[in-house]
Amino acid sequence: MKVEEIRNLSIEEIKKQLDAAHREAMELRFKLATKQLQNHRELPQVRRNIARFETVLRERGLGIR
């Protein structure tokens, strides 16, 4: 998800997406540990999305955007 798309979401929607991304990251870590993960690029992509969600929430908290 792009940052501009995230900025168009409400705070509640961002928090829901963030929770879902954290759950997905946990599942991917388990799959990686048990050698069931097919695409190894998924985990870094999910981590980047988590960082994007948290950045937008922080910006809103500080009143930057």
Image (spheres, rainbow, N blue to C red):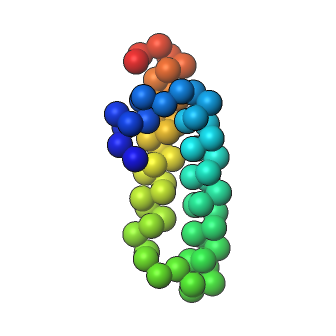
Image quadrant assignment for residue 24:
bottom right
Q: Name the residue nearer the viewer: 19 or 62.
A: 19
Instruction: Tell whether 55 sits left or right of 19.
Output: left
Q: Name the residue nearer the viewer: 10 or 22.
A: 10
Residue 15 place in picture, x, y as percent: 61, 36
Spot the residue most to the top. 63
Instruction: Tell whether 53 sits left or right of 24.
Output: left
Q: Residue at x 50, y 16 (%)?
A: 62
Spot the residue most to the bottom. 35
Q: Residue at x 48, y 54 (%)?
A: 47
Residue 51 place in picture, x, y as percent: 47, 44
Up-down relation of residue 34 to residue 18 (above or below): below
Up-down relation of residue 21 to residue 12 (above or below): below
Image quadrant assignment for residue 29:
bottom right
Instruction: Tell whether 37 sits left or right of 1.
Output: right
Residue 65 place in picture, x, y as percent: 40, 18
Q: Residue at x 52, y 80 (%)?
A: 37
Q: Name the residue nearer the viewer: 2 or 29.
A: 2
Q: Name the residue nearer the viewer: 20 or 28.
A: 20
| Number of marks present in the image shown | 0
Up-down relation of residue 12 to residue 64 (above or below): below
Q: Residue at x 62, y 41 (%)?
A: 16
Residue 39 place in picture, x, y as percent: 43, 77
Instruction: Tell whether 3 sits left or right of 55.
Output: left
